[in-house]
Image (cartoon, rainbow, N blue to C red):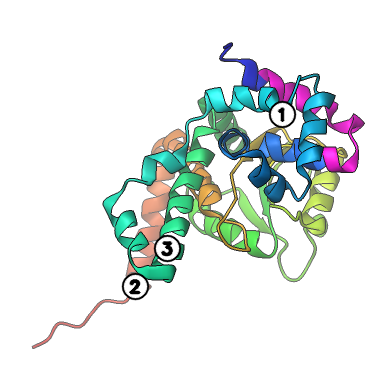
């Protein structure tokens, strides 16, 4: 089988999305966002995850000119490198499985977490990550925006990242909106937007506003198919499927950690010295708790 067929199929699905019915768009987006799971899961499980019928999946295959569902899925099965297979045989996971119902829940969540990290990192080509880091370092201002659960990721990235990237600004500030903070932004600036399904209206509106101002856009999300109103310059896609009701953010955090590593390395001696100055400042001002020695 042609090893590039999976990539060709994903590209064809992306091109077809504007012409699809709402249910077929749901299927198309799921395939694009979760190619490993699509190749791994049986048709009923994929239908459950998409929230559609198995008949809809068959219609998707026909729409993409495949003879059947299995033919549509085959390139993904052929290219599959399952993170789940890597972690299922770990002894400590098996010990959890033997611990009763709650142990099984913890085991499945652990396997999923490790798989999410691998799947997210393996989807980041070196040239894309490097392009993102150099884009940030070359900007006059780097705005960073996210809300609700994604805000925790943004807060951490800002707290650590500003030591290597002094132009980094977490918006909105002082109860404003992100758009307020972008009032004077232009093509010399970059915005990082973090959002996951269901996408935040505030974040999407900020992306649209930023692009209209000529601001470069780097997105961290669970898909590169988000809105037809704008296109990001760089999209970092993190898998987010979880074993519980809420999304799993470990993959997104892993991508941010990789991006931080690149920023520190590309920042060179200046970034290293800046980080040291922060550490010296905190130590000199007793920012860290130190246990008292017992006499």
Label 1 to label 2, Cα distance in Å? Answer: 58 Å
Question: Magenta segment, which residues?
Answer: 8-24
Q: Determine the image quadrant of residue 7.
A: top right
Q: Residue 266 got which mark?
A: none
Question: Where is residue 230, by image quadrant?
Answer: top right
- Structural crowding at the residue carrying mark 2, measured as other residues with C-alpha within 10 Å and reported as few (<14), some (14–19) or many (≥20): few
The spot of residue 199 in percent (x, y) is 76, 54
- The residue that label 2 is drawn on is 288
Q: Nearer the viewer, mark 1 or mark 2?
A: 1
- Residue sitting at x 38%, y 46%: 88
- For the C terminus, the quadrant is bottom left
Q: Is residue 10 magenta?
A: yes
Image location (x, y in percent) of residue 290: 26, 76
Mark 2 or mark 3, earlier in chain? 3
In the rendered structure, the answer to whether residue 152 lies left or right of residue 229 reads left
Q: Position of residue 51 (x, y in %)?
A: 76, 51
Q: Which residue is mark 1?
A: 69
In the rendered structure, which disc, 1 or 2, sits on the residue that comes first in sequence?
1
Tell me if residue 170 comes above or below residue 88 in the rendering.
Answer: below
Question: Within 10 angstroms of label 1, few (less than 14), some, or many (20 or more) residues?
Answer: some
């Amino acid at each position: 089988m042609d090893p590039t067929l999976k990539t060709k199929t994903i590209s064809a699905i992306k091109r077809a999305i504007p012409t699809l019915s709402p249910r077929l768009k749901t299927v198309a987006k799921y395939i694009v966002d979760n190619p490993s799971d699509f190749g791994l899961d049986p048709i009923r499980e994929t239908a459950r995850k998409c929230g559609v019928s198995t008949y809809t999946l068959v219609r998707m295959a026909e729409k993409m000119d495949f003879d059947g569902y299995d033919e549509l899925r085959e390139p993904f099965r052929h290219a599959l490198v399952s993170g789940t297979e890597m972690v299922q045989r770990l002894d400590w996971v098996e010990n959890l499985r033997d611990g009763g119902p709650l142990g099984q829940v913890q085991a499945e969540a652990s396997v999923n977490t490790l798989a999410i990290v691998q799947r997210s990192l393996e989807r980041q080509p070196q040239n894309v990550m490097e392009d993102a880091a150099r884009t940030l370092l070359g900007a006059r201002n780097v705005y960073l925006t996210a809300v609700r659960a994604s805000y925790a990721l943004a807060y951490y990235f800002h707290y650590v990242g500003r030591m290597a990237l002094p132009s980094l600004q977490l918006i909105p500030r002082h109860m404003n909106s992100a758009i307020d903070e972008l009032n004077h932004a232009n093509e010399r600036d970059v915005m990082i937007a973090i959002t996951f399904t269901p996408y935040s209206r505030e974040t999407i509106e900020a992306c649209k506003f930023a692009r209209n101002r000529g601001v470069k856009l780097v997105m961290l999300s669970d898909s590169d198919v988000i809105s037809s109103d704008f296109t990001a310059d760089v999209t970092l896609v993190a898998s987010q499927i979880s074993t519980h009701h809420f999304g799993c953010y470990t993959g997104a955090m892993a991508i941010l950690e990789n991006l931080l590593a690149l920023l520190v390395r590309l920042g060179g001696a200046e970034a290293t010295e800046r980080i040291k100055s922060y550490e010296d400042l905190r130590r000199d001002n007793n920012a860290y708790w130190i246990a008292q020695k017992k006499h």
